[in-house]
Amino acid sequence: MIALDAIDVRILNALQKNGRLTNVELAEQVSLSASPCLRRVRLLEEAGIITGYRAQLDPACLGLGMSVFVDLRLSHHNDAASDEFEAAILRLNNVINCYLVSGSADYRLEVLVKDLQGYEVLLRQLQCLPHVKDIQSNFVIRSVKAQAPMPIAAS
């Protein structure tokens, strides 16, 4: 891990707000000339701090208007069961995030579906996954805060 200075933090914050900034635009925003700005961005990428760039999409515009958080418990708690379950989850396109968590659940999924009928289809798929013992679903009523930038501080 590299130590971040104030300029690195400004670069990261600017890119979190708009990953499509040109290097010249980014350099202007962080008060650098273009060459040093590009060098810093490349160092941040090489260090693994910047892991990629992507477009943010509106799920509703894509016919995926229902978000659901799904808590799953497994019947077995060993590496083989976890590995088999995780491999199966990776094949489900409607699962956009999957977390190994502490507490009453073993995994928390974030899924996007068209509607309740779409969730029923996905739920049946989840029930058939290896080692799934229990499923609890929480339907998102409204997003209050999403896709927020990470809070970054200089080292």
Image (cartoon, rainbow, N blue to C red):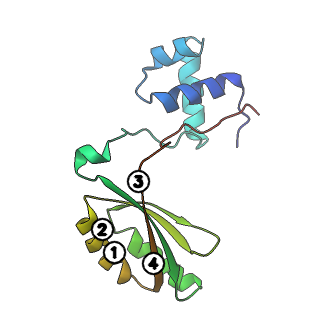
Q: Relative to 61, does residue 105 appear above or below in the rendering?
A: below
Distance (Cα) linking label 3 and label 1? 19 Å
Closer to the observer: label 3 or label 2? 3
Q: Residue at x 49, y 75 (%)?
A: 72
Distance (Cα) linking label 1 and label 2? 6 Å
In the image, taking residue 10 as reference, residue 154 lies left or right, namely: right
> As shown in the figure, which amino acid type bears the numbered disc 4?
Ile
Q: Residues within 10 Å of mark 3 (few under 14, many from 20)?
A: few
Distance (Cα) linking label 2 and label 4? 13 Å
The numbered mark, 2 or 4, whose residue comes first in the sequence reads 2
Please say if the residues under marks 4 and 1 sit with CB atoms less than 8 Å apart. Answer: yes
Q: Which residue is mark 3?
A: 141
Please say if the residues under marks 1 and 2 sit with CB atoms less than 8 Å apart. Answer: yes
Q: Which residue is mark 4?
A: 135
Q: Which residue is mark 1?
A: 123
Report the residue that reaches farthest toward the front: 141
Q: Residues within 10 Å of mark 1 (few under 14, many from 20)?
A: some
Distance (Cα) linking label 3 and label 2? 15 Å
The numbered mark, 3 or 2, whose residue comes first in the sequence reads 2
